[in-house]
Amino acid sequence: MVHALSEIRRILVPEGILIDLRPILSSWPIEVLSAREIRETGRIQDLPLGLADDKAANGSIAQAEQNGWFARQTEEFFPFYYSWDSPSEMEEWIAEEWEDFIQLDEESKRATRSAWALGDADSIVRVKVKMLITNWKKGISGDDE
Amino acid sequence: MTIQKDIERNETRYLHRFADFAGKRVLEIGCGEARLTWQYAKETRSTIGIDIDADALRVAMIDRSSDLENKVNFSRAMSEQLPFSKETFDLALLAWSF
């Protein structure tokens, strides 16, 4: 990934901007949302591969910053919601799309199904993904100068 | 299976708070099906989205509206070897790609 950051630096004009936008694993909350309330019903379990990916990404960007390739300007976290009509749809999606990175424990599945079944007819299920967004300015120093 | 992503539009709101796209030459790395691209591309001078997933890029091309044909393009490429000359872009967006 460090090489990719070097490439990005190369194609940017002087003082060009890099926006890094990515999810960060942090036992994302599972919620049942109805007209009346938002109820947290469990937490996603982070798997070693996902955590290793985050660590590698953080290490690469730290290396790029240390090299003077980019200077951090602003950074913030924000929530990004994945929403499903039912718990079974959420479970299916997670098993198919995110199986390498996260998983659901049985207690969270049970609590989510129960809260959804007792909720309003329009209740939905959602996962609150923690997103990181950073604005980086191309640095004036670097290995290729 | 019905899934909805970011109904609240938090991502778009934060993206515009962190980046000024107006008149910029933008490279989006890891654009996928261009879900995010369509949230800002109209404002840019030009946008190129790259991804290694050819199927996703086909979807992006199909979804491209006629008014963006001269402004937005997609290419299959890897971030470790960007097929562009030095200092071609004002802004790079690394979207969900690490």
Image (cartoon, coloured by chain):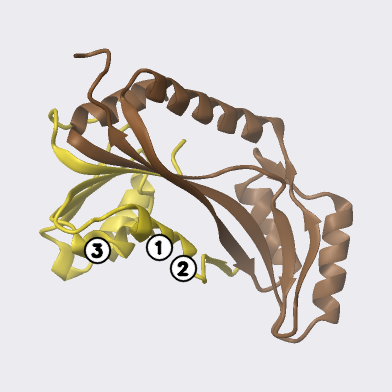
Chain colours: A brown, B yellow
Residue A21, image x and y in percent? 44, 46
Identify the residue at image location x=14%, y=56%: B23
Question: Percent from the top left, x then y, of residue B19?
Answer: 30, 53
Q: Do labels 1 and 3 share a chain?
A: yes
Q: Which amino acid does label 1 sit on?
A: Thr
Q: Quadrant of residue B62 in the image?
A: bottom left
Question: How much space separates mark 3 and mark 2, taking CA atoms?
Answer: 20 Å
Left or right side of B90 for A58? right
Residue B36, image quadrant: bottom left
Same chain letter for marks 2 and 1: yes
Q: Position of residue B45 (x, y in %)?
A: 13, 55
Location of residue B55 with respect to A109 vertically, above or below:
above
| Residue A22, position as x, y percentages in the image | 49, 45
Tell me the number on the disc at residue B64: 3
**Which residue is rendered at x = 57% and y = 58% of the image?**
A79
The amino acid type found where label 3 is placed reads: Arg
Q: Which of A140 and A5 is in front in this view?
A: A140
| Mark 1 in CB contact with mark 3 (< 8 angstroms) | no
Q: Is residue B53 left or right of residue A106?
A: left
Q: Mark 1 points at which residue?
A: B12
